[in-house]
Image (cartoon, coloured by chain):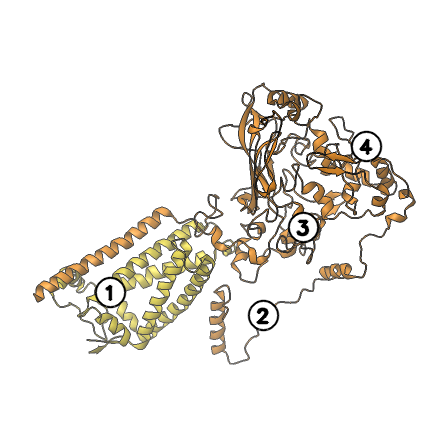
Chain colours: A orange, B yellow
Amino acid sequence: MRLPEQPWTWIVVAAVLILAASWSGPAPLAATGEEEDKAPGRQLARSAVKAPGARWTTADHSKFEALKKDFTKPEEVTAACLSCHDLAAGQIHHTIHWTWICPDCGDGKSMGKYGKTLNNFCIAVPSNEPRCTSCHIGYGWKNKDFDFASNDRIDCLVCHDTTHTYKKFPTKAGYPATEPTLFPEDGVTYLPPDYKLIVGKVGRPDRLNCGVCHFYGGGGDGVKHGDLDSSMGAPKKSLDVHMDVDGLNFTCQRCHTTKEHQIAGRLYTSPAAPERISLTEADLASKIACESCHGQKPHKKDAKANDHTDKVACQACHIPRFARVLPTKMSWDWSTAGRMNAEGKPFKKKGPYGKPVYDTKKGDFVWEKNVVPTYRWFNGAMSNLLITDTVDPTRRVSVNAPAGSPDDPKSRIMPFKRHIGEQPFDPKNATMVVPHLFGPKDPTAFWTGYDWKTSITSGMAYVDQPFSGEVGFVETEYFFPTTHMVAPKEQVVACGECHSQGGRLEGLPGVYVPGRDIHAAVTTVGWAAVVAAILAVCGHGAVRFVSRKRRKG
Amino acid sequence: MLYIYTRYERFWHWLQAALILCLLATGFEVHGTFTLLGYKRAVSVHAWLGVTWLIAFAFFIFWIATTGEWKQYVPTTKKMFEVMRFYAYGIFLGAPHPCPKTAEVKHNPLQRLTYLVLATFLLPFMMVTGLLYYSYNDWASLGLGGLSLSAVALAHLIGAFAILVFLVVHVYMTTTGHTPLAHVQAMITGWER
């Protein structure tokens, strides 16, 4: 027999029995069983995507005159797009995808890849633009002089190409190749795009459009995010229940709702979803979070898990491990970069998973698969170290850190990928540094001259920051909220994995976790009392036994 | 032979014993002392047993109130000293118990006091702290927002140790009859020599 989850039912049963016994009229009918889901909004949405040939768009781009020409440059494509989509450029110019600066965070200038923030992967974009901005939604962001007001420098295709034949060249500041070109680092030959074919089939972005940058952040598949890599392009149910290609098949936009090219998602200093509200409560939620669809009590009625939603984020239990299909980079030690092989040449060494564990350009890496997350209190925002901040090199430097605390009612216990690093800093000024890494013909670039001092001098001059000339290395950490790769419910984190000593929540402050927190002193005294009682009764019994023998003897 | 314990008393005693033993086992598993049922099941079983025991206790209170058996728990100092001296000393010399059991007076003064403290203080304390612990998520709506889960869990834990210590002594005391199993037998059959 299956017992109901919670014993309140006993009280109800007892109350009903007493009522029934004391009342001779017809027994009251208890309203049991759940109503079929008849939400009209959901029904409409279901029928819309079920209709034969159902699409959201009402245009066939291959029939537009403006697109029936032989484009020689990608900028010409953009001009053609904007000839109809006349508001798009203005919208794009205001998005973080274009500026790489969060306009609503801090002073509106510092937060973002092109602000004063850092990471512990390739550290910073400035002075390395041609390499880093191959993931920018524009063309030709080579240096500080990039014209952010230009319209035809916007790359519409990287997001709207549905043929997935359009590729930007990794070191060309966002431009695709103009002739077949081999990129030696990944051994791939990049072909010039067939613009005519591509523009005829432009459409809404799919997972691969987003993934072309977000799966490969940090220069490779799964390098940065442990929960976003190419396995999420067409995941099975076991990897992500929502994006499951044979099931719900959610696109990225299903949760990252988009308005006028502004895509909802993580922001630097302000929580991505400030209100924990359900879409059934308000249609104005800026971003769909778990609760938007599942509500705040998503489990079976009376399930204990419902009592956890005030303190524990859904992700904490429903993403038991990340990097479940492909490995992710868990640590990056820059201090060992620059070693040469026997021939005096830069080299790479591959390790388990076929991933590089050493690269002269970058140092040592550790890759891991099926990683148990690190848990922190999180209110949805991240705090970031700036290049202008001073650091304490005797402790591990948090290049970014989850914002939130156990006392904050909006904070929840959230799983993170914690990436650890060893990266260059200025020991005299006690600041982190921006190294100039990329520049094939520039001897001051680290990846050309392999000299830290020259590289950092160049990088810090580029961002107008002081540099003492001394180079040290400091331990760092960097946090990524783990929110994708939601596992099927059968694979959730078991209760005992947190409710135990040495479990997943070991060391997480500010909350009493039964099974983890045992009141050690009281427990010791308690067992001592039990042992004392046992000894006392044994002693009493022994004396009884002996005295009785004596009396009989 | 005297008939001391009625059928209901014996049923209540053993039901209570079983519930308390299982509550102790599952409670200490939830506390993290050992792994037996697994954390989730231990929590669920513990909560079920707790509510079951609450209901059973309510029936017991009803029973002693309506049958007048509450009189067995009225504390007295009469012969208290003699009973203490018996267990500390006389029992080793084979002296007779100063308060032989009868159907009218089932408990000696020491038992009266112990069971009274148990029934009026320790067990209600466990019920209150247990129910609080259980209703943790409703504290704010119950106007108990200032409570600390850690403190409630600690109080419940201290109570559990107190019950366990009682249990050790209680089980030992059953062996102090005229034969080691006489008291246990009485609690099973109702008859004591």
Residue A288 is tagged as 3
CA gap, disc 3 and disc 1: 64 Å
Query: Whole-Å distance between the Cαs marked 4 and 3?
Result: 32 Å
C-alpha separation, residue under disc 3 versus residue under disc 2: 30 Å
Residue closer to the observer: B142 or A445: A445
Q: Which amino acid does the dot numbered 3 rest on?
A: Ile
Q: Nearer the viewer, residue A109 or A207?
A: A207
Q: Which residue is mark 2?
A: A32
Examine the image and state in which quarter residue A476 appears.
top right
Mark 1 on the same chain as mark 4: no
Residue behind mark 4: A150
Same subunit: marks 3 and 2: yes
Which of disc 4 and disc 2 is earlier in sequence?
2
On the picture, is A287 further left or further right than A548? right
State which quarter of the image contains the C terminus of chain A.
bottom left
Q: Position of residue B30 (x, y in %)?
A: 42, 56
